[in-house]
Image (tube, helix red, strand yellow):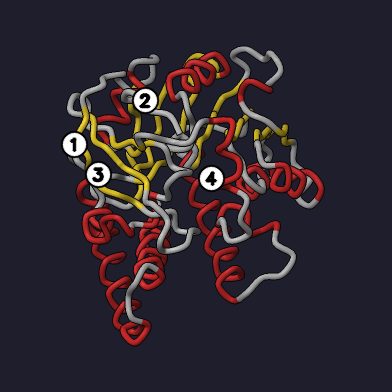
Amino acid sequence: MESVPCPACHTKNSSIKLRVPDRFSAEDETPFVLVECRKCGLLYLNPRPIEEQSGAFYENDAYNPFISAKTEKNTFDRLYDRIRKHNNRSKRKLIERHLSGPGRLLDVGCGTGEFLAEMASVGWQVRGIERDAKAAAYAVEKLRVNVVRGTLDSMPSVEASFDVVTMWHVLEHVYNPHKTLMQIRDLLKEGGLLVVAVPNAHSLDAKIYQQNWVAYDAPRHLQHFNFKSLRGLCEMHGFSVLKKALLPVDSFFNALMSEKLQEQKGGSSVLRPLRWLRAGIVANTAVVLGKFSNYFSKPVGSTLLVVFRK
């Protein structure tokens, strides 16, 4: 483990916000400490696992981004696949509203490649980067999309060659967000789009579920943004906000999985029907409030989805 200053503003002045469990660990394991930067408001793990050891925390078949690569799927897995297809269409339509036609797209942390396949199906030239070997292999072998295993450091030199770079729930995972954004800026054409989706630390569901909010996902998620901290970080690297949007499906996923996590961490299974009912109420409320709050400076939807222009 390593102690670190704020990954966004490098301030060392912080206060403890929550103690967050690893959702894949035993109940009696020591939780991770989530602190809040007193300068910029970013939430981040401190201490956190060192980068060289972080891969071990992703090696679980239940880790949701890689459900597509599972050989045996249960009912929840199949439902998750269907939801993901709908989500990918929504992502494509969001990008199409800001560009006149197909271009070149890079998806950083592309997982099993379904979003790339969706974009390729309408004529986009796509490339993905994924550090997980199993996920990258699935994308290449099953979906026939162009994926490089590794990180942005593995990318060949193709300066300013992409019209769009996307990061769907990736920025919260990276150890050096400043370096990542500098690399992306170099890869984007002038006027190109950076599309970022991250869990919203100011969301309604984060406030309700507290340490059992599934999107805290310690220790895989290293930092958690609100709109102010995300905008500030990206503006440091020459990006300006073009559009705030929603991923409504994330609200339902987060609420359902957070209820499940609460039960795993000591809740009663007898109350399960009431938990599912509450999840539906929380998710629907988050979608409605998220839609209206996007017009203001403090969005409260489950996910911050922001389109930036270089």
Residue under label 4, please give it: 92
Q: How far apart are marks 3 and 2 (CA)?
A: 32 Å
Q: Position of residue 287 (x, y in %)?
A: 29, 59
Name which residue lies at 53% across and 59% down.
86
Mark sitting earlier along the chain (4/3): 4
Residue under label 2, please give it: 4
Q: Dot 3: within a 10 Å radius of its alpha carbon, few (fewer than 14), some, or many (20 or more) residues?
A: some
Q: How far apart are marks 4 and 3 (CA)?
A: 20 Å
Q: Position of residue 225 (x, y in %)?
A: 31, 37
Nearer to us: label 4 or label 2: 2
Residue under label 1, please give it: 297
Mark sitting earlier along the chain (1/2): 2
Mark sitting earlier along the chain (1/4): 4
Q: Dot 1: within a 10 Å radius of its alpha carbon, few (fewer than 14), some, or many (20 or more) residues?
A: few
Q: How far apart are marks 1 and 3 (CA)?
A: 7 Å
Is there CB contact under 8 Å for labels 3 and 2? Answer: no
Is there CB contact under 8 Å for labels 4 and 3? Answer: no
Secondary structure found at label 1: loop
Name which residue lies at 34% across and 51% down.
20
Q: Distance between the residues labelled 1 and 4?
A: 25 Å
Nearer to us: label 4 or label 3: 3
Nearer to us: label 3 or label 2: 2
Residue type, label 3: Asn
Nearer to us: label 1 or label 4: 1
Residue under label 3, please give it: 294
Residue type, label 2: Val
Toward the right, the furthest residue is: 141
Q: Dot 4: within a 10 Å radius of its alpha carbon, few (fewer than 14), some, or many (20 or more) residues?
A: some
Q: Dot 2: within a 10 Å radius of its alpha carbon, few (fewer than 14), some, or many (20 or more) residues?
A: some
